[in-house]
Image (spheres, grey):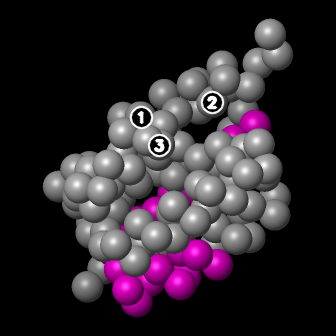
Amino acid sequence: MAELRLSAERRDGSLIITIEGDLDMVTSAQLDEYLKDARRETSWIILDMTGVSFMDTNALAVIVNCWKRLTAKGGALALAGARRQYTRALWITGLASRLPTHDTVDQAVAAGGAARQPE
């Protein structure tokens, strides 16, 4: 079982949370706490899932909860680098088509910045 590692960095108004390792029943509580803290800082979060080696429905529930809470206060959640073979639950449930998903963090940052520009 891969250890879960979480880190964060700010870039262009977004908080990028890098996730590495397994997202499962054991590590979902750790992810949930990390995301709760992040939501206190910002309402624009990008989850860099490039380093996720497994994800189950417990982690999916945590991500959905975070997404709902962010959008309720006018924010957004985007996913970057989610590799289908390791994060299948996103596609099976249809969440991958409802959340903004990007191949890279740079693409997610660029898309988020464009969405937040005043008209």
For residue 1, above or below residue 12: below
Q: Secondary structure at mark 3?
A: loop
Q: Amino acid at mark 3?
A: Leu
Front label number (3 vs 1): 3
Q: Which residue is mark 1?
A: 102
Q: Residues within 10 Å of mark 2 (few under 14, many from 20)?
A: many
Q: Which residue is mark 2?
A: 112
Q: In which quarter of the view is residue 14 placed?
A: top right
Q: Residues within 10 Å of mark 3 (few under 14, many from 20)?
A: some
Q: Residue at x 47, y 51 (%)?
A: 48
Residue 77, horizontal then vertical, whole percent: 59, 47
Q: Secondary structure at mark 1?
A: strand
Q: In which quarter of the view is residue 90 placed?
A: bottom left
Q: Which residue is mark 3?
A: 99
Question: Which badge, 2 or 1, comes first in the chain's sequence?
Answer: 1
Range covered by the magenta-colored residues: 13-33
Q: CA distance from mark 3 to mark 1?
A: 10 Å
Residue 99, horizontal then vertical, whole percent: 47, 43
Residue 23, horizontal then vertical, whole percent: 37, 74
Can residue 116 be seen here? The reply is yes
Q: Residue at x 36, y 39 (%)?
A: 97
Q: Amino acid at mark 1?
A: His
Q: Nearer the viewer, residue 7 or 112?
A: 112
Q: Is residue 73 left or right of residue 93?
A: right
Q: CA distance from mark 2 to mark 3?
A: 12 Å
Q: Nearer the viewer, residue 68 or 17?
A: 68
